[in-house]
Amino acid sequence: MRKFLSLLLCLILFAVPLTGCKEAETEDGGFTVVASIYPLYIALLNLTDGVPGVSAELMTAPDTGCLHDYTLLPGDMKKLETCELFVINGAGMESFLDRVLENRPELTILDASEGIVLLPAEEEHDHEEDDEHDHEGHMHENNAHVWTSVEKHCEQIQNITEGLCLQNPENEALYRENAEGYLAKLEELKGRMTQQLEDIKGRSIVTFHEAFSYFAEEFGLNIEAVIAEEPEEAPSPQRIRELVELVRAHDIQALFVEPQYNSASAKVVAAETGCELLILDPIVTGERDKAAYLTGMEQNAAVLRRALMKE
């Protein structure tokens, strides 16, 4: 019996320190940074790669897409309750910020589009006042799809890098090293895309919605029209007729749709005009892949070149 008690005492003495270490590690928790949208999450994967104690997360599900009038879910708020830094796209994309700050007024928010020259929004978004949106019709002043310009996305990454260094200075050297490497890849990407698109025969395109305005500005394309002013809503029959007339008037050969949205309305226009339907991806959904932005944008350039090199 005495031997048993001695053995039990030893187990207790050794168990206490181990439990204490585990609790301290959980309470410390490292440094967690959360991105509001997928393209910024991919940027964070590159900037935090190999940085000890730092983890990057995406607030929404990876198939959510653009946050047009997005309503926060309980799981989203749970992620924001435990993170040290929340990286947003800005430019009017995250209309739910007031609700975030109501729940976590002390949360540090980094606006990745701060200081970047923005394009104006192309249309007014009207909504009925309801519980889901909690607001009446409004005007988005700026086009929020900044990341579809490689150059402006580089500016976003520079903003994020500065924010990471400020909030987690012990890892500044690693953040800056990662940023330098990723920005170099993006500059190479822009050079390749410029070469792919410099000798195309046509410059006029019709896109699904206004996600590619920055892309068009960067590579000298003319967006003659967008198919859906509200990406979640089908255009009216009158709008369809207007698009058919516009496509014929400008001799447009291809319509560009996005994999995240229903393309039924675009198929109607294509059937009426004989246009080809092709996919341009704004890279707002995808896998946990550090190269996702690079491969997605290069694929977009290849699709455009194939469509616009035709007579």
Image (tube, grey):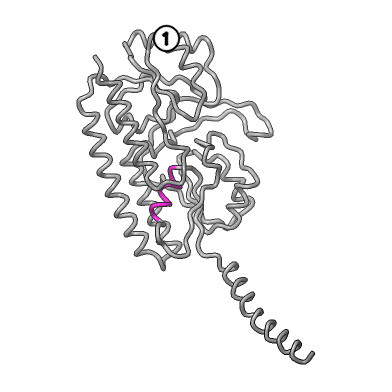
Residue 63, position as x, y percentages in the image:
52, 37
Residue beneath disc 1: 244
- In the image, the segment drawn in magenta is 39-47
Judge the density around disc 1: few (<14), some (14-19), many (≥20) Cα neighbours within 10 Å. some
- Specify the quadrant that holds the C terminus: top left
- Residue name at image x 57 percent, y 70 percent: 25
- Specify the quadrant that holds the N terminus: bottom right
Residue 138, position as x, y percentages in the image:
55, 30
Residue 232, position as x, y percentages in the image:
55, 26
User: Is 222 in the magenta?
Assistant: no
Residue 195, position as x, y percentages in the image:
21, 33
124 and 224: which is toward the camera: 224
User: What's under tag 1, amino acid-wise?
Assistant: Val
- Residue name at image x 40 percent, y 57 percent: 49
174 and 236: which is toward the camera: 174
**181 is higher (above) or lower (below) than 146:** below
